[in-house]
Image (cartoon, rainbow, N blue to C red):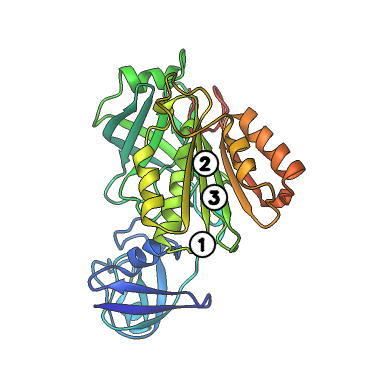
């Protein structure tokens, strides 16, 4: 049994399962309410219940007084619906509205997804959560004062841990440490979220997503957020790499297209193995998309990959496929000193 929750002033409507917090239900369905600790202590998720019954859960008295409760206020990170609700709450609509935090993070899991790709799952302290938009990135703060930036590969609603996709860069100080020295339970310091590359949910245009290598990380976050939001927008995902090892989560992307009728997945290899082992598309990944979409005038495009790939896609999509320039969103790898889905 679920309860319908109406949000004022946005008019958004979502359903909460019995025992599910209002915040968890909202994030699961793509309604981005503000939050901080998710433990009923910081007050960042405070809102008002206009009608209906709730259980306040573990809300701390210093964050929500008896007078607050009597006036209808609640902490949505721990309050759960006991009936249909009308609530008044602010919502996150842009990256500028999300606070940037510096936090410790424990390496929870290391997964070698390919010979040169490591998936890192980071666990934050129990009293902390990192709010972000699908597609944004965080920085790893190194002991020598340098920073290395990586896109978040998980969707915002799934923030129990943070996932990074790290490609081994020969000579890269941090990436070589990831592959040769980093261990589970090691502590890292992170700062974020950062970046203006994120899913723009105020549009109903079909989406064309282009990923090169570990540029798949933020694209994965965008797709999983759209799925959680139950978006009906058409999604065409093109993921390119030199060889099959570069498509390190191929089964996951194929599963999306098999499970969701609005998602189409096209893998592309620029250097396929000899002997006919690869039966899929070949060549440059953005060129494959252009073959299928010669007219992008009604689309919204998200691209993540190398600077060369991003520049070529922008030039060709806008110049040849009639894509409006303001509908092209991109994030590019910039090794050594700036943000990227892969970095040194």
Locate residue 235 relative to residue 248 in the image: left or right: right
Locate residue 207 relative to residue 129 in the image: left or right: right
Instruction: Characterize the local packing of mark 3: few (<14), some (14-19) or many (20 or more) Cα atoms within 10 angstroms.
Output: many
The quadrant of the picture occupied by the N terminus is bottom left
User: How far apart are the two marked residues, 3 and 1, measured between alpha carbons?
Assistant: 13 Å
Quarter of image, res 178: top left
Which residue was labeled with disc 3? 198
Along the viewing direction, whichever of 96 and 344 lies nearer the viewer: 344
Which residue was labeled with disc 1? 92
Look at the numbered disc 2 and give the secondary structure of its residue: strand
Along the viewing direction, whichever of 252 and 73 lies nearer the viewer: 252
Q: In the displayed structure, would residue 229 be above or below residue 265?
A: below
Q: Are marks 3 and 1 in contact (CB under 8 Å)?
A: no
User: How far apart are the two marked residues, 1 and 2, measured between alpha carbons?
Assistant: 29 Å
Marks 2 and 3, the one that precedes in the sequence: 3
Which residue was labeled with disc 2? 238
Please say whether residue 64 is visible from this viewpoint. yes
Q: Which mark is residue 64?
A: none
Residue lying furthest bottom = 51
Identify which residue is drawn at 39% across, 62% down.
27
Look at the numbered disc 1 and give the secondary structure of its residue: loop
Q: In the displayed structure, would residue 284 be above or below residue 291?
A: above
């Amino acid at each position: 049994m679920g309860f319908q929750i109406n949000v004022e002033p946005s008019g958004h409507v979502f359903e909460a399962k019995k025992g599910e917090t209002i915040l968890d239900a909202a994030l699961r369905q793509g309604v981005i309410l503000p939050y901080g600790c998710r433990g009923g202590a910081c007050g960042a998720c405070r809102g008002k219940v206009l009608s209906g019954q709730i259980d306040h859960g573990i809300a701390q008295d210093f964050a929500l007084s008896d007078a607050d409760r009597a006036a209808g206020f609640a902490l949505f990170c721990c309050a759960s619906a006991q009936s249909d609700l009308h609530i008044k709450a602010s919502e996150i609509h842009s990256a500028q509205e999300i606070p940037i935090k510096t936090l410790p993070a424990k390496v929870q899991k290391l997964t070698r997804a390919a010979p040169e790709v490591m998936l890192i799952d980071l666990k934050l302290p129990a009293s902390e959560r990192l709010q972000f938009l699908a597609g944004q990135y965080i920085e790893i703060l190194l002991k020598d004062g340098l920073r290395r930036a990586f896109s978040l590969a998980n969707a915002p609603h799934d923030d129990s841990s943070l996932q990074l996709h790290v490609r081994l860069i020969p000579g890269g100080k941090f990436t070589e440490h990831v592959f040769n020295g980093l261990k589970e339970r090691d502590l890292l310091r992170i700062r974020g979220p950062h970046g203006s590359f994120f899913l723009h949910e105020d549009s109903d245009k079909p989406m064309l997503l282009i990923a090169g290598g570990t540029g798949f990380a933020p694209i994965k976050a965008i797709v999983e957020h759209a799925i959680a939001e139950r978006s009906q927008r058409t999604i065409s995902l093109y993921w390119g790499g030199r060889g099959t090892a570069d498509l390190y989560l191929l089964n996951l992307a194929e599963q999306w297209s098999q499970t969701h009728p609005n998602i189409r997945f096209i893998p592309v290899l620029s250097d396929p193995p000899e002997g006919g082992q690869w039966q899929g598309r070949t060549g440059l990944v953005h060129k494959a998309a252009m073959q299928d979409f010669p007219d992008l005038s009604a689309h919204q495009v998200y691209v993540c990959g190398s600077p060369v790939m991003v520049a070529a896609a922008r030039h060709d999509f806008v110049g040849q496929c009639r894509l409006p320039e303001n509908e092209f969103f991109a994030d590019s790898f910039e090794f050594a000193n700036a943000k990227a889905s892969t970095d040194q």
